[in-house]
Image (cartoon, rainbow, N blue to C red):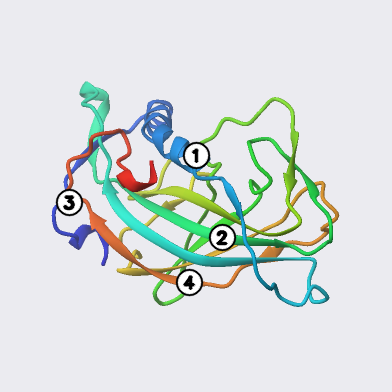
Amino acid sequence: MSAPHVSGLYKVVVSFHARKFMDLLRLLLCSAWVVALASCSTLPILGPTEDPTTTPAALKILNAEASLHRVATEDGGDDFAEEEYFILRTMCRLRVENRSGKTQQVMSFFGSAYDDLRLRVRNESGQRLATTTHTLWVTPLLEGQWFPLPEGASVVELSCATLVGAPLPDDDLPVISPSQLTQTIQLEYFGGFPGSDFTRAFQSDSITVKISDRTAEVPRRSVPVPQDHV
């Protein structure tokens, strides 16, 4: 399912001027950041875990979902030109196992022990589309803070919002090409825990998810998100 062939696609307005363009995009994705931050909560998991002698920590995606949304913008006048942009929103329930035998302290400039984890998005053929994170649109703290990574297994919900459309002036921002986006995508997490006893990065398994087409919905917010994840 490439974005240009999805039914109900509507054109939105974005700026050709890099400064105004980036200010607009950051404003549009503000609500996506709020959802991602609110979803970053942990719950204990009871029951047996894997052999603690294998690795000091492990990541596993329990389940995930993805949806494609229209971007709502306002007409900015002569400085704007019409382009098609969409938001690919992903939500993953990630199990994190701390097998070190103690609570680890993790340094972050955002808000949790999981902020160094990155999401890699691939299409159904395995081609990498983007690498992103739930902290992409968050303004970092002036100073890093310590956050606990509980001993044993815990679950965290991480939500990401990735633009789908033409390349942006800022190469650091991930954008998925519409021609490469397929109806199903593969998601995997990787990363580490800065400041902890873990000196290596970890990678989760890969999970295949079908994209839910919500481009026909009239956006009520700058970035529309499913109500059940607000």
**How dense is the environment of label 1, judged by Cα within 10 Å: few (below 14), some, or many (20 and up)?**
some
| Residue highlighted by disc 2 | 94
| Picture quarter with the C terminus | top left
**Residue at 70 percent of width and 25 percent of height:** 142
Helix, strand or loop at mark 1 = helix
| Residue highlighted by disc 4 | 207
Label 2 to label 3: alpha-carbon separation: 31 Å
Q: Position of residue 186 (x, y in %)?
A: 45, 69
Q: Tell me which amino acid carries mark 1.
A: Ala
Q: Tell me which amino acid carries mark 2.
A: Leu
| Residue highlighted by disc 3 | 9
| Residue highlighted by disc 1 | 38
Say which of 29 and 43 sits in front.
Answer: 43
* Mark 3 or 1, closer to the camera: 1
Label 1 to label 2: alpha-carbon separation: 15 Å
Which disc number belongs to residue 137? none
